[in-house]
Image (cartoon, rainbow, N blue to C red):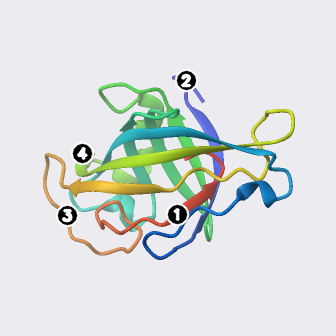
Amino acid sequence: MTDGAETKRETERKYEAPEGTAVPDLTTVRGVAAVRDEGVTELDAVYHDTPDLRLAADSLTLRRRTGGEDAGWHLKFPVASGIRDEIRAPLSDSLPGALAGLLRSRVRDRTVVPVVRLRTSRHVRRLTAEDGTPSPNSPSTPSTPNTCRPAPGPPGPRSRSNSPTTPTKPSSTRSGDT
């Protein structure tokens, strides 16, 4: 892929626990020798789609996110249930050409506009193996939204439970990087 974009396969699993549930001792998990608390990271994601939500209708997600280790543009395509390919491009003010080209067959002549903004505080806990490398069992950290409000641009209907225009209380942990 050109323009510095890279692809990563993402497998997502969601877990929910009652408010106030403590994180268990993860060093009892095979392959996890230590848990490093790296504090809280502030993320700011703006999700983009056409005004008629063509990307959401095809279960595609396009976002521009700042903050965290993977700031930039992320385009996610469904592969199978709970599995998506994520194509990432470096952070820029406008949609990178490599990602725009991949969207052309879906959006056709429509303009891609911001449809929702999600600000997240993510408490980062890094799971490591005995030698200090990231554990192969290491899930990414849960994230909790602080605010979710429409970004500038036309509002869209809330029609899909997993679309970026439907704020939900996240309770997800993913294997792979988010």
Tell me the SS state at disc 2. Answer: loop
- Residue beneath disc 4: 111
Say which of marks 1 and 4 sits in front.
1
Indicate the amino acid at tag 4: Thr
Spatial CA span between label 2 and label 3: 31 Å
Residue 40 left/right relative to 146? right
Which residue does the image show at 47% across and 35% down from the upper left?
A: 68
- Residue beneath disc 2: 4
Spatial CA span between label 3 and label 4: 14 Å
- Residue beneath disc 3: 156
Residues at badges 3 and 4 in contact (C-beta under 8 Å)?
no
Indicate the amino acid at tag 2: Gly
Foreground pick, 137 / 52: 137
The picture places residue 149, in percent across and down from the top left corner, at 19, 55
The picture places residue 96, in percent across and down from the top left corner, at 40, 29
Of the 4 image quadrants, the one containing the N terminus is: top right
Query: Which comes sooner in the sequence, label 1 or label 2?
Result: 2
Residues at badges 3 and 1 in contact (C-beta under 8 Å)?
no
